[in-house]
Amino acid sequence: MKPAYWDDARRALSRGDPVMRKVIRRCGDAHLVARGDPFLTLARSIVGQQISVKAAQSIWERVVDAAREVTPQRVARMRPATLQACGLSVRKVEYMRDLATRFRSGEVDPSHWSHLDDEAVIAELVRVRGIGRWTAEMFLIFNLLRPDVFPVDDIGLLRAISLEYPGEFAAQDQEAPSARRQARAAAAEIAERWRPWRSVATWYLWRSLDPLPVEY
């Protein structure tokens, strides 16, 4: 189901930013699709860490096939070798199993998250092993449908901004921390014009790189 704010956000972004208007038009009528199950959303985000959308989708489909039912109970019982065979790294297997164990035990209880602001939810999620700020931000966008999240460390987002805003964003290919900081700062400055709809702008920029709808 389309988020209730989506059409308003689309119109506001199109009016306020000519570049974003062109990106939105190229993407057509597609929109963010909510992921209603918190465990699935977080598990998909772990799978998608630092890899392309296509690669993440392929690995996720293999996980679904292997698990038959992706639940905390089932994933916690799966052998690490089975998850690795799906394409997950050793580290991601550890994260997935730890997440499943915490959900199964009740240590992670998402029932109250809808009452917290974005930063409070992020602070709680990053205490879970393997869930950093990027993964928490994916959860805010795809599960809680928060409208104004800007995952500035997302590689795909930075690449899309560099392509769509070449006059304002100097793409940084170097590995130096200073170069990465400059890239993030430039992206964050551009994103200020998208408030309070930065989640929506981010989603459209992801799709500008890949027609496959982004889902975590």
Image (cartoon, helix red, strand yellow):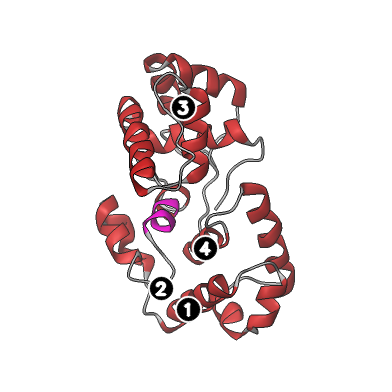
Provide the residue designation for mark 1: 98
Residue 164 in the image: above or below residue 70: above
Residue 71 percent coordinates (x, y): 58, 73
State the CA–CA distance, disc 3 to disc 4: 29 Å
Identify the image quadrant of the N terminus: top right
State the CA–CA distance, disc 2 to disc 1: 7 Å
State the CA–CA distance, disc 1 to disc 3: 38 Å
**Label 2 residue SS:** loop
Magenta region, residue range: 133-138
Which of pointers 2 and 1 lies earlier in the amino acid sequence? 1
Q: Is residue 70 at least partly visible in the picture?
A: yes
Query: Who is closer to the viewer here, 26 or 48?
Result: 48
Provide the residue designation for mark 4: 46
Quick one: label 2, few (<14), some, or many (20+) residues within 10 Å? some
Residue 85 in the image: above or below residue 78: above
Residue 135 percent coordinates (x, y): 44, 57
- Which residue occupies 53% across, 65% down? 43
Under mark 1, the amino acid is: Asp
Mark nearer the viewer, 2 or 3: 2
Tell me, yes or no, whether the highlighted magenta stretch contains residue 92: no
